[in-house]
Amino acid sequence: MRITAKSDYAVRAMAELAAAEGSPLTAEQVATRQDIPLRFLFGILRELRLAHLVRSVRGPEGGYLLARPAKEITLADAIRAMDGPLANVRDVGLSGLEYPGAAAVLPDVWRAVRASLRQVLEKTTFADLAAGELPPLVRERAREYLDDVRHYDT
């Protein structure tokens, strides 16, 4: 899976909003804190607002807030709002996907990939990020990655 810049920026922006604990942050504050291009961030915040993940507050003390408590919003919610399904194969649903011959079991691999992504991204909330505490499964997967002797560059 490829995490797009748009999803990365959206998750980072929402993490800042979660850490603000109900105090509105301006787009400029979020952009500066996370080193996100401001013009790009405005578009992302608009999409997050349309997905009912953030809301805006007008006025001199205005800015952006999470639309729900941080413990109720997962990273998967933000990524789906930006890029759609977590794991997609040629824009085809995985349920009925079938391949012939030697690739017959490949759809099960794609299903396992989606399930693995969901286990991590649907269990991690913005409250977890704001607190700096990740669910045990996520910590375990990160440790597995770091311990892998191949040390992937990508």
Image (cartoon, rainbow, N blue to C red):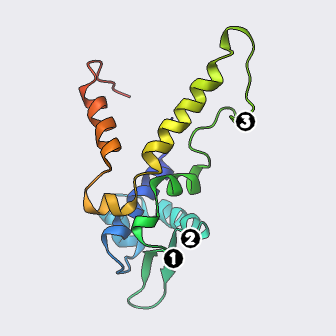
Label 3 to label 1, Cα distance in Å?
Answer: 32 Å
Q: Quadrant of the C terminus?
A: top left
Q: Are marks 2 and 1 in contact (CB under 8 Å)?
A: yes
The answer to which of marks 3 and 1 sits earlier in the sequence is: 1
Dot 2 alpha-carbon crowd within 10 angstroms: few under 14, some 14 to 19, many 20 or more = some
Q: Is residue 34 visible?
A: no
Q: Position of residue 20 (x, y in %)?
A: 31, 73
Q: For mark 1, what is the residue? A: 55
The answer to which of marks 2 and 1 sits earlier in the sequence is: 2
Q: Nearer the viewer, mark 3 or mark 1?
A: 3
The residue lying at 46 percent from left, 57 percent from top is 74
Q: Is residue 97 above or below residue 35?
A: above
Q: Position of residue 129 (x, y in %)?
A: 32, 58
The residue lying at 73 percent from left, 19 percent from top is 99
Q: For mark 3, what is the residue? A: 92
The residue lying at 45 percent from left, 91 percent from top is 59
Label 3 residue SS: loop
Label 3 to label 2, Cα distance in Å?
Answer: 27 Å
The residue lying at 51 percent from left, 67 percent from top is 45
Q: Which mark is residue 49?
A: 2
Q: Report the side of 22 relative to 57 (left or right).
A: left
Task: Give, as a three-letter code, the residue at label 1.
Answer: Arg
